[in-house]
Amino acid sequence: MGACSSREKKFEGVVGGEVDDVEDAGDVRVEDGGSRVRLGGNSMYTSMFTQGGRKGINQDAMTVWEDFSGEKGMFFCAVLDGHGPSGHHVAGLVRDILPSRLSSAFKLSLPNSSKCDSDIVHGNHKDDSKDSHENKNFEYPLFPLWKASLIKSFEEMDEELGSNSTFDSFCSGTTAVTVIKQEDHLIIANLGDSRAVLCTRGNRNQLVPVQLTVDLKPNLPSEAERIKNCKGRVFALPDESGVYRLWMPDQNSPGLAMTRAFGDFCLKDYGLISIPDVSYRKLTDKDEFVVLASDGVWDVLSNSEVTRIVASAKKRSMAAQLLVDRAVREWKIKYPGCKTDDCAVICLFLKTPPLSTKSTSKNGRDGVNNHQQLAVSQRSATRRSQQGCESTKANSKEEYSALQGVTRENSLLSLPRFSTVLGRRRSINQPSTLKLFEVHN
């Protein structure tokens, strides 16, 4: 993509708190044309934190790519919520592979001409047609390319999971909620029931939450219709009133509480798909930040509560941990007899902080000495955060125990019979009937 400086918004007010934090430069790796990849910690624009629940190993994962695809100021954020015995492996592999695959797919989709119109490439092209004001996607001509690239990379990622022999994804999988920020354009892709919420300002300058994704669950009519057309079953158990699940046609398993996911190949012939729901939003000066989180947060906190908690953080770097701490507390209050779910949060702040309080990196820039104590605190928080993110290591001593004891609304209820024997996806060359029911958003 052509070089273009990002049009950053000016920071107004104290939403997200002060920004006198030290960047966690030690947790950053550089790849894919200069992208800075984070698995935890914080930067000037992001705050990340995850904490395992009481179901065994933390199966949530997350990543932030700054200067994504080599473009200055572009962000890619993803939160993944694994489920099933190998859910942490599935989430970890998707976290590590999907971003670079998406970047490559998008670059290949761009016009071949080396002299592409810079305004079009960066979404500044104005469409003068009479319908342009009625269709928000006309404001960003690259949206169709991003959407096609997201669908392509998600499907290829799922195929790679199916052929992976290092772990079994027959009855294990993961959700994925991703956001791409390119200047004042936001592209959202969702798979499953993790969620992205935007915090903006209302007419009276009050905080207003805007849900950017739809929780893709079996109770949605369009999702249920696809499942039934593929011979899958949708129903709620008597002791889980209102919690609709996806079941195999001949077994009361696995009882998946979502309709789209990576992995879970025992259900891929019965209506479960890996095609993301992709949408677009044009950012304005009223928009403050975006929160991406796994359902461990949304099960106990409303969109309004989440935005208020993040906005109340005194420092941006602590926003994600503050939200996770509050969610864990709510689990104990609302469901004292249940196992706390894993929680993962990414906060993406949309406005540039004042020059006097910008973050400084731990690589010798001015201001390091004034923040040594905070830096130690941040490194400790990041290490705790990454304990969950790096859960794909084979020598992990924790075991998956979500199906044991008392839990609330597990993503997966039971394992299919003979899953260890059938736990290899059919050949990727075999035609899939699911193409007939592909949803176009």
Image (cartoon, helix red, strand yellow):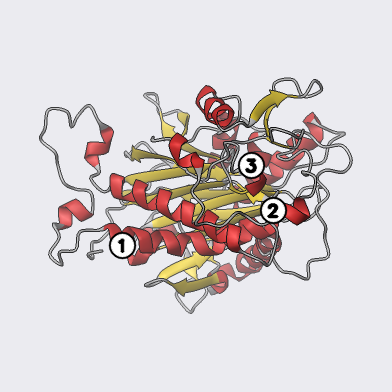
Checking the image for residue 23, the label placed there is none
Q: Secondary structure at mark 2?
A: helix
How packed mark 2 is, by other alpha carbons closer than 10 Å (few <14, some 14-19, many 20 or more), is: many
Query: In this image, 259 relative to 185: left or right?
Result: right
Instruction: Confirm whether residue 437 shows in the render.
Output: yes
- Residue for badge 3: 267
Instruction: Confirm whether residue 315 shows in the render.
Output: no
How packed mark 3 is, by other alpha carbons closer than 10 Å (few <14, some 14-19, many 20 or more), is: many
- Label whose residue precedes the other's in the sequence (1 or 2): 2
Residue at 66 percent of width and 66 percent of height: 165
Which amino acid lies under the numbered mark 2 shown in the image of this protein? Gly
Residue at 69 percent of width and 24 percent of height: 235
Q: What is the spatial separation of the Cα atoms under label 3 and label 2, in whole angstroms?
A: 15 Å
- Label whose residue precedes the other's in the sequence (1 or 3): 1
Between 100 and 226, the residue placed more toward the observer is 226
- Residue for badge 2: 87
- Residue for badge 1: 107
Q: Secondary structure at mark 1?
A: helix
Residue at 82 percent of width and 41 percent of height: 339
